[in-house]
Image (cartoon, rainbow, N blue to C red):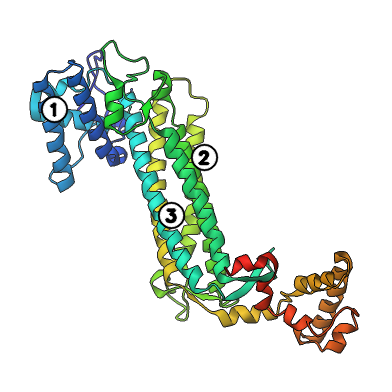
Amino acid sequence: MKLWGGRFTKAEDKLMEQFNSSLTEDMVLVDEDIQGSIAHAEMLVHCKILTREDGEEIIRGLYSIWNEIRSGKLKIEGDHEDIHSFVEATLTARIGEAGKKLHTSRSRNDQVATDLKLYAKKQAKSVIDCLQALKNSLKEKALENNNVIMPGYTHLQRAQVVTFGYHLRAYIEMFSRDEQRLKHTIEILNENPLGSGALAGTTHDIDRDITTKKLRFHKPTANFMDGVSDRDFIIELLSDFSIIMMHLSRLSEELILWSSQEFSFIKIDDAYATGSSIMPQKKNPDAAELIRGKTGKIYGALISTLTTMKGLPLSYNKDMQEVKLPMFQAVDEVLLSLQIMDKMIATLQVNGDEMKKAIKAGFLNATEVADYLVKKGVPFRDAHGIVGAIVLYCEEKGNSIEDLTLEELTSFSEFITEDIYDYVNYSSLLNRGNKKEMIE
Ligand code: ARG
């Protein structure tokens, strides 16, 4: 069923019809499409472009379609070009003449832009909710492990003592910025394209403030051509998603490493791991690996959308139909990834003893020994050299710095005295300087 055809003398090729149709993918826009149509019809009645009777019939018809779709009674299917065509054709089949008036002073071009913005806003809010839930789980796990010391790494080499709680809190900061980015995206996409028409407005005296208010946008888009042309908000959303996935992927990588026998720092709950079909002993961190893997897909969606939009002349071009599916898929994957990560964090077990062992074997108080010498008046660069020599000595002896005798230690510097042992104790060193922030 087509919304056009008057100027055509030949039927559309079947293959072309399939090629052109986006119905199976854009059916996820059905709520937004019907909401937009209801707001549009109400506005047309208010502006006396539609009679009250026609308007009421249209709105009743739209609600009945909406309810039946929700209950599963009405299936979104058939040879319709897209969700907009499906809704209009179904409406007209139900209510007759009045249905044909709904599209007055509207184009699918401003309609699809409106649907997409409403969808983007809704999904950005769902992602924010999932981010907040994940942040809460991280906060709880961090609190439980506030005093569990672990090696902090640079270059994946043991570097200095941190706590497991503090490590998790680093991710809370990242996810908080992700949340802010999404809020900003919502803020600037909050302009209503409806009323832009195909690209050049309409000769009807419509009132765009009415649809703007009804659809909860902040204001109408200022330029009709911009209103129907741009998909920058999708690119922005996908770029927010890409950053979220990059953060999730780093956390996933750490969970994978930490749960390996080489680290044994944590145990991932059985509910988020799988086994091997051949190796009976295996427990694989699939959930974390899948999140890491899906990150590539989200980057792909971003690059594909940027590439589709590149070089398109104003205003609407059918190329733009292609930016929808990558976004819909990205939304699903990001929401799922955040929820799975949330559950994985909430259920993971921490092995503080293994973390402590790794600290001891890694000279993780070497920097603090240098700090100690500085406090005793040794210039930092000299202190660095002295401690380097101590580490070398320890490596040869297979010993840790804190296990050396005072005699051994003073042979490297006369400034070292008995109080060194307390100063470089792994737990108490977190009570000094701004390190205190780590355990507050
Ligand atoms: N299915 C189209 C899309 O998703 C809707 C807009 C179609 N406009 C048009 N002039 N053919 O982009």
Report if the beta carbon of the residue with label 1 is closer than 8 angstroms to ligand 1.
Answer: no
Q: Position of residue 140 (x, y in %)?
A: 45, 68
In percent of width and height, residue 96 lies at 9, 24
In front here: 137 or 259? 137
- Residue 236: image tag: none
| Residue type, numbered disc 1 | Ile
Residue ID for mark 1: 58
Q: Please tell me whether residue 28 is drawn above or below residue 219 in the rendered image.
A: below
Mark identifier at residue 303: 2
Q: Residue at x 34, y 15 (%)?
A: 201
Quadrant position of residue 193: top left
Identify which residue, 7 or 192, lies in the foreground: 192
In the shown orientation, is residue 330 left or right of residue 415? Answer: left
Image point 29% across, 38% down: which residue?
Answer: 29
Indicate which disc, 2 or 3, sits on the residue closer to the N terminus. 3
Distance (Cα) linking label 1 and label 2: 40 Å
- Look at label 3 and name its amino acid: Leu
Residue 81 in sight from this viewpoint: no
**Residue 426 pos. (x, y %):** 68, 78
Q: Position of residue 128 (x, y in %)?
A: 41, 50
Q: Is residue 276 left or right of residue 198?
A: right
The residue depicted at 56 percent of the width and 79 percent of the height is 352
Q: Residue at x 54, y 54 (%)?
A: 174
Ligand 1 sits in which quadrant? top left
Report, in whole angstroms, how far the alpha carbon at label 2 lies from the one at label 3.
Answer: 23 Å
- The residue tagged 3 is 131
Q: Residues within 10 Å of mark 3 (few under 14, many from 20)?
A: many
Residue 392, by quadrant, is bottom right
Q: Residues within 10 Å of mark 1 (few under 14, many from 20)?
A: many
